[in-house]
Image: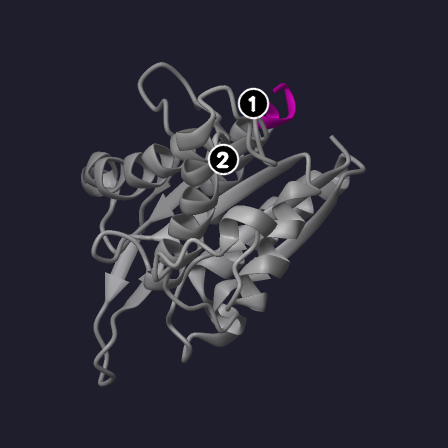
Amino acid sequence: MKKIICISAANIVHSRNQSTSLLLCEKIADIVREKGIICEIIDLRDSLLSPCIGCGKCYESKRCYYDNAFNGIYESIIQSDGVFFVSPHYAPIPAKLCMLLEKMEEITFLHWWKDNTYQSEVYGIPAGIVSHGGGSDWALKSYKAMVNDTISNALETIQLKTAAFDTEWETGISIGVSKVTEQSDIFPIQEYEWNTILHKLRKYIDVMLSK
């Protein structure tokens, strides 16, 4: 692999550079760069994405007629050798990630509907999925079901290839917190065991690079 894209899907603006999704992307980038691979981080908070309206204008161009932000991200994925989706558990996944996935799905589906042998521009590109949330290890299977599996189902339509971590975690990995503390702010403070997380990320990245 020569280039990896890592997409930070969190919506929370006030977290700025302390966003867990962004921090995980930075850890992934550090690991793949150690291996001589370029990694581009895309923070969806910086993108003015819009929902798909089903107009069908993407059929001819394979691009969204109305959304240049989407088109730029889509081009980056097309030109990559692999992509990571790093997503917190929301309801179940962040809105901008939904917008990104639904537009890639629409472009692929419209062409597949006309020709069932159609291969999308991202056909077979390996995709890693990393989910996280405010719970500890007890919540990880829940994050897998609601976040990883949801994203992986969309990627199957788009024809990206989800990289399994192992036979139990066939749609990627989930990260839990080590400690949550309450303060005067309305948001809890989440702490992570980064050494353990880095070990897990390294193993998953090795799986990705073998695809």
Give the class, few, some or many, for how many residues have Cα within 10 Å of label 1's Cα (few <14, many ≥20): some
184 displayed left or right of 159: left
Q: Quadrant of residue 152?
A: top left
Q: Which residues are magenta?
A: 206-211
Relative to 69, does residue 142 appear above or below in the rendering? above
Magenta span has 84? no
What residue is pinned by disc 1?
A: 207
* Residue 62 visible from this viewpoint: no
Q: Residue at x 54, y 27 (%)?
A: 203
Q: Residue at x 37, y 29 (%)?
A: 171
- Left or right of residue 7: residue 145: left
Given the current orientation, which residue lies at the most extreme bottom position?
184
- Dot 2 falls on a residue whose secondary structure is strand
Residue visible at 44% across and 23% down in the picture:
165
Callout 2 touching callout 1 (CB < 8 Å)? yes
- The kind of residue tagged 2 is Gly
Secondary element at image label 1: helix
State the separation of the CA atoms marked 2 and 1: 9 Å
Q: Which mark is residue 128?
A: 2
Residue 170 drawn above or below residue 191: above
Q: Main secondary structure of the magenta part?
A: helix
In the rendered image, which quarter contains the C terminus? Answer: top right
- Residue 125 in the image: state x and y as whole percent: 59, 30
